[in-house]
Image: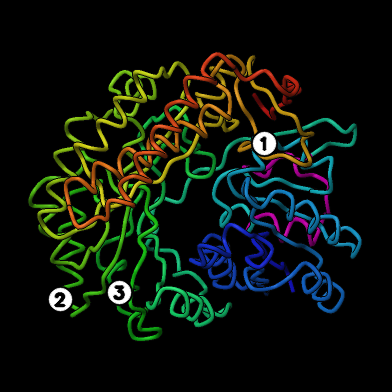
Amino acid sequence: MDILLAHGYFLYDDPHELKVMKPYPPLGILYISSYLKKQGFDVGVFDSTFSSLEAFSALLAQAKPTVVGLYTNMMTKRNVLAMAHLCKQHGAIVILGGPEPPYYAEDYLKRGADIIVKGEGELTLAELLPHLAQHGLTQLDFINGIAFLNGEGKLVETLPRAFIQDLSANPWPDREAIDIPQYMKIWKDNHGQSSVSVIQARGCPYTCRWCSHSVYGNTHRRRTPADAADEVLWIKERYNPDLIWYADDVFTINFRWFFQYAEELKQRGVRIPFECISRADRLNEEVVKTLAEMGCYRLWNGSESGSQRVLDAMDRKVQVKDVQEKTHLLQRYGIETGMFIMLGYDGETIQDLQETVDHLKISNPDIFLTTVAYPIKGTAYYAEVESRILSDKNWDDRSDRDLTVSGRYSRRFYQFATRWMVSEVALNRARLKGGVSPQRRLKLWANARIGRLGMELTKGSQEQQGQPITPAIASVSHDH
């Protein structure tokens, strides 16, 4: 085996995900697997989703891979650190990739990783694996797209690797390497319908300041409409899922591609209900009508805030009124609307929160999910607030989700704010729809008032707990 690919998501160890039970396969490492196999490499895949750390350790002992590649994000960080430790115990070279390691390269390298892959993994690993087989961990300086510690223990980051331009030249994800039917069964058992995920493009060219572009940069590259449709036809014939999840950052970003793709699906007789993510400014009536004809049953929109001032500070490049209008347009065509709402962005005031509540009442999305802003290293938002970032955990035990910003309202405040927002919007919906019992309305009213009162009582408290984050040591970049 030339390389064992794995990831650190263990479903049965995650109480939150056990409540949701909507797992999807690790398409990133499946793309790498199929690419490397096409190049003639012997590749193994360990899908941790339904497995355990003990099973991973047993596989290492049995298969004895010389190289292990671990996909890493902030949610799986702690598991990956444990997996890297196991790999070293079994004598394997450890390569980390994904969105999390590049901006914490030195930290990961000092805790068991040998090499960090920055950006897309296919081309880098195809060059790296023969090098490791011949030279081991020496002479890495001229392999683009990696970071490592040199003989003196100093961080070295090589030149960036160019992105893959022709995505359709890549083979489809190596779905046969894992148990796709098990994913579908979990969905079916918990939600009555099975779902399979696909990716038709890579990257997002927008400049939202809080969003990480660690893997694909600010690029946007699409597969050909025919290739994308061929894969969905194959998925239908091979797995016959009830639903499709398009995991693209902005599914309708390119109108010409989108309409061609819709036509390619029609020509193949493929119509599978699906959900996707887009933006208000990349929707119009023709696009929405086509989405409905294709089978789109839900579209998620990163609304983030109802305050135009906050949206402009985020560099979101969307208008509140446009989000409201496009939400209503989608609903007129029978498409459910979902919104992502972010509270606590730097400089947000109670007035901004009120505008977000008003925005949600006017838009009336079918569902909205809230999060409190946190700074992700490598983003413009992180750089803006870096001197005020706090944490009460050491690096090994935290992720960027655990970081907060000195000077903003406390976490307790945002707990009350979320309670107020969710209850106030639900109460407004109950008034519009009718058919809601007086007891239910009273409960929503009481929760909204408790939330609003809690905000008033805690608005004077600001984030002060924890310790400032120590600035990272400056990197030594090769040939820069």
Q: Earlier in the sequence, mark 1 or mark 2?
A: 1
In the rendering, which numbered label is found on residue 158? Answer: 1
Image quadrant holding the N terminus, namely: bottom right
Image quadrant holding the C terminus, namely: top right
Q: Residue furthest bottom?
A: 237
> Mark 3: which secondary structure?
helix
Give the Cα separation between the discs numbered 3 and 1.
37 Å
Report whether 385 appears left or right of 150: left
User: At x 80% / y 75%, what residue is drawn?
Assistant: 59
Reading the image, the residue beneath label 3 is 230
Q: Earlier in the sequence, mark 2 or mark 3?
A: 3
User: At x 14% / y 39%, what residue is drawn?
Assistant: 325
Picture coordinates of residue 478, whole percent (x, y): 69, 30
User: Which segment is the magenta one?
Assistant: 126-148
State the residue in front, 153 or 456.
456
Residue 237 picture quarter: bottom left
Residue 16 picture quarter: bottom right
Residue 382 picture quarter: top right
Reading the image, the residue beneath label 2 is 267
> Mark 2: which secondary structure?
helix
Q: Amino acid at mark 1?
A: Thr
